Amino acid sequence: MANPRHAAALIPLLWLATLGQASAGMTVITLTDIARARLDALSFFLFAYLFISWLVKLLWNYLGKTFTALPKLNYRRALGLVFLSGMMFYVVLTMISGAREVMTPGAWEKQGIGYRTREGGVAYLGKDERRSALRELQEAIWAYAKQHGGKAPPGPLVEGITPELWQFRGGGLYCLMSDVRPGGGREVLVYEPSTAGGRRFILLADGNIEDRDEGTLKSDLERQFRK
């Protein structure tokens, strides 16, 4: 006579073996594609978390043979150490994201768990539109300099210039080199923020507007700072 325990253990195996055949003629409750994908992702990250914790335990105890001050680390403590380290990285990345939003206000919008450039931002601004906006700001700066002995504004958002002119339509504010006098020379006076992309429009002291790539603009600014 068969052992009842063995017979009970065979029931799940028989169910799994006949599942494919039963689904052809019977209703079988299964996960949706989205739920199955999420379960696969959670399973992968759980496996990675457990495996990394095991590696941390091995590495920690290996180093403990050389650095005797290190206490012995068991697997449970390794799990806690990896979890706390992950939370620290999460906080740092959150702070970086917050700083990015502060430096380029309104340029990003949430999409799922991540962020993307807001629609209507730099990716949708044409060169003519960007050049025209910078030309409007140039006219306001020249008018300000005419009333203040030829000096540029000490910074953005000063009285006498409409605040909206300083706002780059792709996000952020135009960058001003306040020590440059408008009216002559080839020094950079105003340039677009980083949200403008790889090539930025700049306003020179002589009133010309040109576009420069990131590397060239950085070199030009460094030369101005050294003067």
Image (cartoon, rainbow, N blue to C red):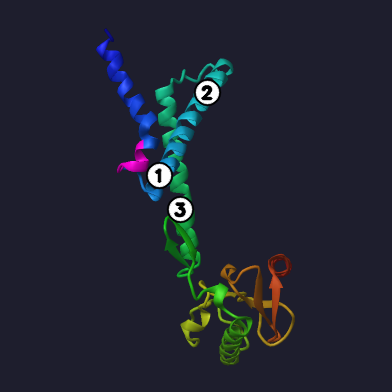
Instruction: Identify the residue under disc 2.
Output: 60
Residue 222 rendering spot, x and y as whole percentages: 71, 65
Gap in angstroms between the C-alphas marked 1 and 2: 36 Å
Pick the front one: 29 or 112: 29
Q: Amino acid at mark 3?
A: Met
Pick the front one: 91 or 32: 32
Would residue 42 be found to the left or right of residue 184 on screen?
A: left
- Callout 1 crowding tier (Cα within 10 Å): few <14, some 14–19, many ≥20: few
Residue 167 rendering spot, x and y as whole percentages: 50, 78
What span is in magenta? 22-28
Q: Is residue 90 above or below residue 213?
A: above
Would residue 216 be found to the left or right of residue 160 on screen?
A: right
Dividing the picture into quarters, in which one does residue 41 lie? top left
Residue 76 rendering spot, x and y as whole percentages: 40, 24
Instruction: Identify the residue under disc 1.
Output: 36
Residue drawn at 30 percent across, 43 percent down: 27
Secondary structure at numbered mark 2: helix
Secondary structure at numbered mark 1: helix
Secondary structure at numbered mark 3: helix
Pick the front one: 215 or 117: 117
- Residue 7 sits inside the magenta stretch: no
* Sequence-first tag of 3 and 2: 2
Q: Amino acid at mark 1?
A: Arg
Instruction: Identify the residue under disc 3.
Output: 95
Gap in angstroms between the C-alphas marked 3 and 2: 29 Å
Q: Amino acid at mark 2?
A: Trp
Dividing the picture into quarters, in which one does residue 214 lie? bottom right
